[in-house]
Image: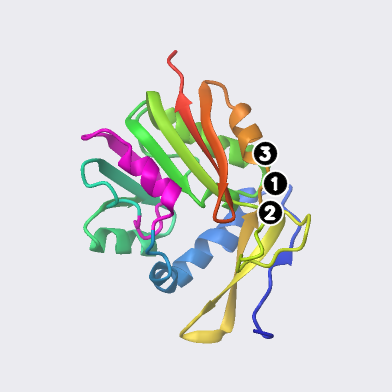
């Protein structure tokens, strides 16, 4: 479509990063939550396989759970969801899942509480390398020793079949969203697009974990890691 809004390259903040993310991530998802939820219903195969591999009775956390589409994949585990968007959490609860509003950098869970943790298409919304690293550290904190962590992020490298149209080399962008109820209004969400190997390096910068698998799937990079015993 000729009039479809395209991603815009942006400069990332050098201070007050939390306010930047509040304006360009959190408030946007509050506004688009209902429409966004309608487009999020099919689990990605790697995530589905990971969840179905968890032992019966495992306790998991979905950090940045959105509308909770992954929380019912494996009914033989129990999952708690969290998201910054209260409107998305309302949808989670309406679907019969356990969800709460929480900050991904300050999760309301005890250390070593979960057998597994997933964070799908979330960490790319943090606007600095430091904050992205802190997000992974927080996922690791709440995972028990020997537990698993799965993270997906959008990739800079897109296949020719992708609906995403990014300028080569532009890693920090606003990605537009149009509400079907008001196409004249465009909401811009901040994303950091990860280069190949960048997510792996970010995990390696965090002590106390081992990378089990790293890969590329559906125009995303992902890492599965195990928290080491201490």
x 52%, y 67%: residue: 28
Residue located beneath label 1 in the image = 195
Tag 1, which secondary structure?
Answer: loop
Picture coordinates of residue 68, whole percent (x, y): 34, 56
Residue under the image location 74 percent in, 47 percent down: 14
Q: Distance between the residues labelled 2 and 1?
A: 7 Å
Question: Crowding at label 2, few (<14), some or many (≥20) Cα neighbours within 10 Å?
Answer: some
Q: Is residue 228 above or below residue 107?
A: above
The boundaries of the magenta stretch are 43-69
Crowding around mark 1 (Cα neighbors within 10 Å: few <14, some 14 to 19, many 20+) is some
Labelled pair 2, 1 in contact (Cβ < 8 Å): yes
Q: Which of marks 2 and 3 is nearer the N terminus?
A: 2
Quadrant of the rendered image containing residue 3: bottom right
The image quadrant where one finds the C terminus is top left
Frontmost residue, 132 versus 57: 57
Q: How far apart are marks 2 and 3 (CA)?
A: 11 Å
- Left or right, residue 210 beside residue 97: right
The residue carrying pointer 3 sits among few (fewer than 14), some (14 to 19) or many (20 or more) residues within 10 Å by Cα, namely: few
The quadrant where residue 170 appears = bottom right
Q: Position of residue 72 (x, y in %)?
A: 27, 52
- Which residue position is annotated with label 3? 197
CB atoms of marks 3 and 1 within 8 Å: yes
At 68% from the left edge and 54% from the top edge, which residue is drawn?
A: 157
Quadrant containing the N terminus in the rendered view: bottom right
Q: Mark 2 points at which residue?
A: 157
């Amino acid at each position: 479509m000729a009039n479809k809004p395209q991603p815009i390259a942006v400069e990332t903040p050098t201070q007050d990063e939390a306010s930047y993310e509040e304006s360009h991530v959190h408030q946007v998802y509050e506004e688009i939550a209902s429409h966004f939820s309608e487009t999020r219903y099919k689990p990605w195969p790697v995530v589905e396989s990971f969840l179905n591999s968890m032992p019966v009775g495992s306790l998991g956390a979905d950090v940045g759970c959105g509308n909770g589409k992954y929380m019912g994949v494996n009914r033989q585990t129990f999952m708690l969801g969290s998201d910054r968007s209260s409107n998305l959490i309302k949808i989670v609860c309406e679907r019969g899942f356990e969800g709460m509003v929480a900050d991904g950098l300050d999760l309301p869970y005890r250390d070593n509480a979960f057998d597994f943790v997933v964070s799908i298409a979330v960490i790319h919304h943090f606007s600095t390398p430091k904050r992205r690293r802190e997000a992974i550290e927080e996922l690791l904190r709440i995972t028990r020793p020997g537990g698993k962590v799965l993270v997906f992020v959008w990739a800079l490298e897109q296949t020719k079949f992708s609906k995403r149209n990014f300028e080569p080399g532009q890693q920090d962008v606003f990605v537009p969203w149009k509400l079907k109820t008001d196409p004249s209004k465009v909401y811009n969400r901040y994303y950091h697009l990860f280069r190949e190997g960048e997510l792996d390096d970010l995990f390696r910068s965090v002590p106390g974990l081992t990378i089990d698998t790293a890969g590329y799937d559906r125009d995303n990079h992902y890492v599965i890691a195990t928290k080491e015993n201490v």
